[in-house]
Structure formats: C-alpha cells, structure tokens
Amino acid sequence: METFASLMESLNNFVWGPPMMVLLLGVGFFLTVGLRFISLTKIGYGFRQLFKKRVNAEEGDVSPFAALMTALSSTVGTGNIAGVAAAIAIGGPGAVFWMWVTAILGTATKFGEGVLAVRYREIDANGNRVGGPMYYIKNGLGPKFMWLAAAFATFGIIGSLSTGNAVQANSIADALKSAYNFDPRIVAFILSALVAGVIFGGIKRIGAVASKLVPFMAVIYIVAALIVIAANIGQVPAAFGLIFQGAFGLQGAGTGITIGLMMLAMQKGVARGLFSNEAGQGSAPIAHAAAQNNDPVNQGIIAMLGTIIDTLIICTITALVILTSGVMTADCLASPAILEMLQSGSTPEGCEIGVPLTAAAFDATLIGFGEHIVTICLCIFAFTTIIGWSYYGERCAAFIFKERSIPVFRVFWVLAVFASTFALSFETGGDNMVVATFWLIADSLTGLMAAPNLIALILLSPVVFKLAKEYFDKDKIANDGLIDQDDM
C-alpha cells in the first residue's frame, strides 16, 4: 500500500505541477477578461434566469434548473465535506484561499463550458441531446483535433470511476461505518440497488432525483453550518487570518515565508477547488448540453452559478466550521515540521483528515448531533454525485464506443459502486493512508481530464466571446424568447 501511495503521490505532483496550475488559473483569467467580467457582474442576472419560464418549448431533455442540479449533484458532495477538510489538513488553512481563486476565475470557465456545450451539442441515435468537451472539440475544432476529444473521453471514463464512483462510494461506507458501525458489505448491496434504480432511468430520472435531493440537503447542511459558525463567531476573524497567512506561506507575524508551504497550499487548494466545482474539468458541460435551452449563452450564465453555490458558499462555510470549532489544534496546522512529515507520507498523530475532521468540527458545537448531520449529508451528497457522474461516464463511453455501450457501462458502474463500498470491509488499519490515497487518485485523474478541456476552451474562446457579445446586446435580449427580460 505504501508503494502504491508513493506512486500516486508522484503522479499527483506531476499532474498538479506548475504547468497545470498556470493553465487552469490562466484560462480562467483569460476568459474573465475576454468576457469583460460578465461572469462576475451577471451573477444576479443568472439566478433570475434560472427560474424564468420560456415562451416556446425548447429542445433538450431536462429543464435548465434540472441540468444545473445534475451538475451540482456531481459537485456538491465529498468535495465540500471531506475535500475541504483534506485540503486544510494537508495543505493548511491557506488552501481555502486558493480554492476561492479557482472558484472566482472558474465562473468564466464554467460560463464558457456551458456556452460551448449547447452550441456544439448533437442528437444521438436515441434522440437525446448530447454534448460536452468531446463534442465541442469534434464539432468546433474539426477532425484534426479528434485525438484531443478521444483523450478527454478516455480520461472521463477512467476519472468517473474514481472521482465520481470509488471516492464517493468509499466515503459513504466509511462514514456509515465510523458513525454507526454499519457493515460495509450490507451498505454495498443497498447503495448499489439505489444507484441502479436511478441511473437506468437515464438523464431524466437523474435530473428529477437531483432536483429534489440537492437543494433539500444543501439547505440542511448550510443551516447547520451557520449555527456552528454563529456559536463561534468570535473565532471568525482568526480563521480568516489563518487562511490569508497560510495562502502565502506565512506562519505568523515575523516568521517569514515558507515557499514549500505556500506551494502545498496552492496545490491542494487549486486541486480541491477544481474537484469541488469542476470548473475547467469538463464534466459539468455534459449535463448542461441536455438542457431545454436553445440559447448557448443563457445556459452558460446558468452553468456558472454552480461554481458560486458550490465553492464560494458551501466550501467556505465548511472551512469556517473547521477553523472556528477549535478541533484543529496548533499541532495540526501547516508548519515546516508538518510539511516534512507530509512529504514523508505521514500525518501528525491525533490530527484528523477528511470526513472525521469535518464531523468533529460540527460535533464540537452541536454536541450529539453534529456528527449525524455530517454523516447524513455526506451520504446524500455522495449518492447524488454517484448518479450525476454516471451520466458523465456513460456519455464519454458512448462517444468512443457508441450508444450500444451505455447499458453495459451502467451495469459496470453499479458493480464498481458495489466493489468500492465492499472493499472497506477488508480494511483493518486505522491510519489515514487509505483515505489520502483515494484523494490522490481522484486529484490526478481530475487534472488529466481538465487538460484537454482547457486547451479546447482557449482555442474556442473567440466563439464564446462573440456569442456573449451578441447576447448582451439589448435588442438580442428583448427577442430571445424569455419573459420579463426588461429587468436586464
């Protein structure tokens, strides 16, 4: 296990080296400026568009709201609960700052993805609207770039089985085992059956389930988190201080900058930010391509809301719960000594990572209830992530192997859920290496998916800029088929 973990650490360091961070943040900055900052100034407008009724029936398989909820079902999950905790535990509080940077720039990235998803979508052999990076690479860039589309689809299949399947299923089993001592073997059977009952109904059933579960559980989680933060309101300024100090490798007043800690915070923050909101990864546009919306820009505006909700709101709230609760002692905060331990593959004794850290933070204030809230929310969020990512994976599979592969992929998906959950029953150790290794694998595959998509976004950016400029012309808005557009 140690050898495998070491290999994954090396791969992760390569994938998330300076080139990837520059590419990810650079594309977001380039699109933000190229779009004249509309991804930030039109957030309120986007929320109004989300619930507007459309005069004419539009092509697509699910409503724009359901498309967003499907995309959010894949992002609001372990990344918000376990991922934020892992980022803080490994990269220090400063990782939260870099999650924010990724999210702010990611709004433009998500906007571009949503625009291109609808602009270049197709109708498959079953009559469904399908799209995503592999389609806008193929239809937007032409035959010379088919290798790039195939690369994304390949990484998408593999990545979905890790990011959207194994990590989520294992997190559910781990949470239920830790909180209630549930047998992972029983959880494996129940979870597999529930997943099968949803994904075999296709995108319409996935969208319907996500539209109900995601908003309901998000509200419960946010309310509980705000209660914890309110109870520890006096610690909020210090928490923000730790975030900003850690972001630049500062260990406190007068101690100077530790470059290694700053790079670790940046690496984990950017990786966790991308894992959380998937901006630039290319998964969300697969869901947005199925929206009943003929206007690419309008769906792009709705798509960018996912980053706001997921990272800037939910992840920030989770981080403040952890940092204000007092469960993360000085011995567990990032320092040169801890950096040396992390580089050697170990974590400080008594320092939690992932779900246990978040659960402990909630339970420190909501005594007797906090752990249950986190466990239940995690399980629901992870379940919706599994069903949302199943659609991403099957669309990638269909791109390479055609629609006949979808039933086979769904069966394989359910079996993978079962295996990932069942595997926890063989774990006998109590250290954090298994959890950390799962996250390393997910991080690496997330980065591999992002690279082809980010390249396509750069090459197709003139299309995004042109369509956005046309859309925000007042005459265009007044006649785009939407009601009450005079509030623009």
Image (spheres, rainbow, N blue to C red):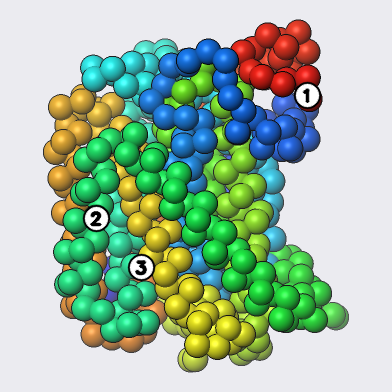
Amino acid carrying mark 3 in the image: Ser
Q: Is residue 103 above or below residue 57?
A: below
Question: Along the polypeptide, which appears first: circle 1 or circle 3?
Answer: 3
C-alpha span from label 3 to label 2: 16 Å
Per the image, the residue denoted by label 1 is 488
Q: Residue at x 62, y 70 (%)?
A: 225
At numbered mark 2, what does the secondary structure look like: helix, strand or loop?
helix
At numbered mark 3, what does the secondary structure look like: helix, strand or loop?
helix
Asked where in the image residue 62 lies, by quadrant, the reply is top left
Per the image, the residue denoted by label 3 is 171
Could you classify mark 2 by the number of other residues whose Cα lies within 10 Å: few (under 14), some (14-19), or many (20 or more)? Answer: few
Please identify, in this view, whether the residue under mark 3 or under mark 2 is nearer the observer: 2
For the question of whether residue 48 can be seen, the reply is yes
Q: Quadrant of the N terminus?
A: bottom left
Q: Residue at x 81, y 74 (%)?
A: 237
Q: Residue at x 56, y 79 (%)?
A: 362
Amino acid carrying mark 2 in the image: Leu
Per the image, the residue denoted by label 2 is 194
Q: Where residue 410 appears, x then y in whole percent?
A: 20, 42
Question: Along the polypeptide, which appears first: circle 2 or circle 1?
Answer: 2
- Image label count: 3
C-alpha span from label 2 to label 1: 43 Å
Could you classify mark 1 by the number of other residues whose Cα lies within 10 Å: few (under 14), some (14-19), or many (20 or more)? Answer: few
Q: Is residue 202 above or below residue 375?
A: above
Q: Where residue 315 appears, x then y in whole percent?
A: 60, 61
Q: Where residue 222 appears, x then y in whole percent?
A: 60, 63
